[in-house]
Image (cartoon, rainbow, N blue to C red):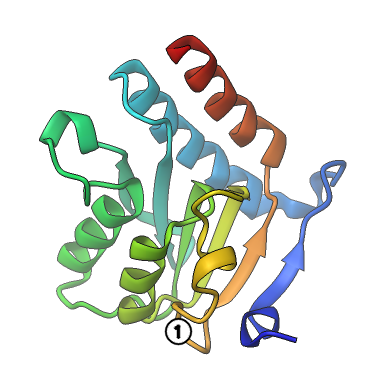
Amino acid sequence: MSNFQSHIQSQIPNSAGGDLGGHQVFMRQALDEARQAFRRDEVPVGAVIVCNDRIIARGHNLTETLIDVTAHAEMQAITAAANFLGGKYLTDCTLYVTVEPCVMCAGALGWSQISRIVYGASDEKRGFTRFAPDAIHPKTEVVAGVLEEECSALMKEFFKKKR
């Protein structure tokens, strides 16, 4: 058993009902961010960071707009949250992101000591759980699969139009 498996708080089934409450509410906000990226012809990944049941930061991919390979949704949100809080550590915060973070973003999330990562769609090609499951902080909890179908559908629609 990898060390990462101890991070997993829960895997949300595709047919999960309304018991997800807050996770779904905040993931819908991340989906709104992803749609903004989609409209800008950016890979549609969106993120929000929540502290004390309040959104303190938002971000979506801006890699094409900024001509910056590091301008991922998570990186935008981490920077905004740190600025809002006045410090680099995001303890007691939760990241909601539409797609599983990549290795770079997982490393940044690890350094931020974020308490929880909630993501929608898994990323089997570039996701951190495949390549660097221990990149996140040892105390970080992970919730996977929240609104997975909606998050995945947006990505599929984006890449379908690119073909």
Image location of residue 24, percent across then percent down: 64, 45
The residue carrying pointer 1 sits among few (fewer than 14), some (14 to 19) or many (20 or more) residues within 10 Å by Cα, namely: many
The structure residue drawn at horizontal position 56% and vertical position 45%, both measured from the top left corner, is 27
Q: x%, y% of residue 19?
A: 81, 53
Image quadrant containing the N terminus: bottom right
Element assignment for label 1: loop
| Displayed quadrant of residue 107 | bottom left
Position above or below: 93 against 152: below
Between 163 and 49, the one nearer to me in the picture: 163
Instruction: From the viewer's perspective, tell me whether residue 36 is left or right of residue 143.
Output: left
Residue 102 location (% of width, % of height): 43, 57
Residue type pointed to by label 1: His
Looking at the picture, how far across and down is residue 84, in whole percent? 19, 63
Vertical side of 11 occupied by 132: above or below: below
* Image position of 30 with respect to 11: above or below: above
Q: Which residue is mark 1?
A: 137
The image shows residue 20, relative to residue 90, as above or below, that is above
User: Left or right: 25 with respect to 72?
Assistant: right
Q: Residue at x 62, y 80 (%)?
A: 4
Identify which residue is drawn at 41% across, 40% down: 46
Q: Is residue 39 left or right of residue 87?
A: right
Q: Nearer the viewer, residue 51 or 36?
A: 36
Of residues 103 and 75, the one drawn nearer to the viewer in this rendering = 103
Q: Which residue is found at the position 48% from the left and 77% from the top?
A: 115
